[in-house]
Amino acid sequence: MNEKTEPAPLLEPPVAGSEADTLIGSLERQRRTLAWKCEGLDAAGMNTRLAPSTMTLGGLLKHLALVEDEYLTGRLLGKPLGAPWDSVDRDAEPDWEWRSAASDTPEELFALWESAVARSRAHVRRDLAEGGLDTPARREWPDGRAPSLRRMLVDLIEEYSRHVGHADLIRESVDGRVGEDPPR
């Protein structure tokens, strides 16, 4: 059988690498850190909140799965989103992913997020090979401009970085796990 194996994701940005490897390495470090902050918890741990916020680690995983799909499937490729996003009326339930995560098991949340990340990695690899970081998104902004893949990667890094900070605080409140980077 000739199955194509995907390259292992970078663990962090290279010390002196290409712009693409630096951006992707930074995004991968944020993804790894989020996974580490969420791993090994039961449903109670995934649903822990810090007052006054309603944010949970489960909600973060589901939200970032949506962000992955929205940015790198919806915006970059201009394609409709698949399940579970395609069955949600986002206008009627704009925070659906945050609220509905409480009904999902930790395994379901990780599977949803991991599959979104895998799709994103594949889309980025393809667009980097075909057009590089300057590849424009197929879905334009409302003003008609199309952000580049470079801009979308920067936006994803910012989104993850913000939410990894939230995950730090929530996880510490669950069981005291602290730290900046997961063990290798």
Image (tube, rainbow, N blue to C red):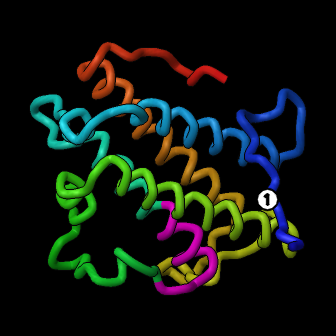
Q: Quadrant of the C terminus?
A: top right
Residue at 44%, 81% in the rendered image: 82
The percent coordinates of residue 121 (x first, y second) are 68, 60
Q: Where is residue 85, by image quadrant?
A: bottom left
Left or right for 28, reference 56: right
Residue at 27%, 61% in the rendered image: 97
The residue nearer to you, when weighing 32 against 140, is 32
Mark 1 residue element? loop
The residue nearer to you, when weighing 115 against 60, is 115
Q: Which residue is mark 1?
A: 6
- In this picture, is 141 found above or below 111? below
The residue nearer to you, when weighing 140 against 64, is 64
Q: Where is residue 149, by image quadrant?
A: bottom right
The rendered magenta stretch, by its main secondary structure, is classed as helix
The percent coordinates of residue 80 (x first, y second) are 48, 86
Specify the segment rendered in magenta: 68-80
Left or right for 24, reference 102: right
Given the image, on which type of amino acid does mark 1 rest? Glu
Q: Residue furthest front?
A: 1
Q: Quadrant of the N terminus?
A: bottom right
**Does the stretch in magenta take in 69?**
yes
Residue at 57%, 46% in the rendered image: 157
Q: Where is residue 65, by image quadrant?
A: bottom left
The percent coordinates of residue 111 (x first, y second) are 45, 57
**Does the stretch in magenta take in 104?**
no
- In this picture, is 26 found above or below 151? above
The number of numbered badges drawn on the structure is 1
Left or right for 118, reference 124: left
Give the class, few, some or many, for how many residues have Cα within 10 Å of label 1's Cα (few <14, many ≥20). few
Residue at 82%, 33% in the rendered image: 14
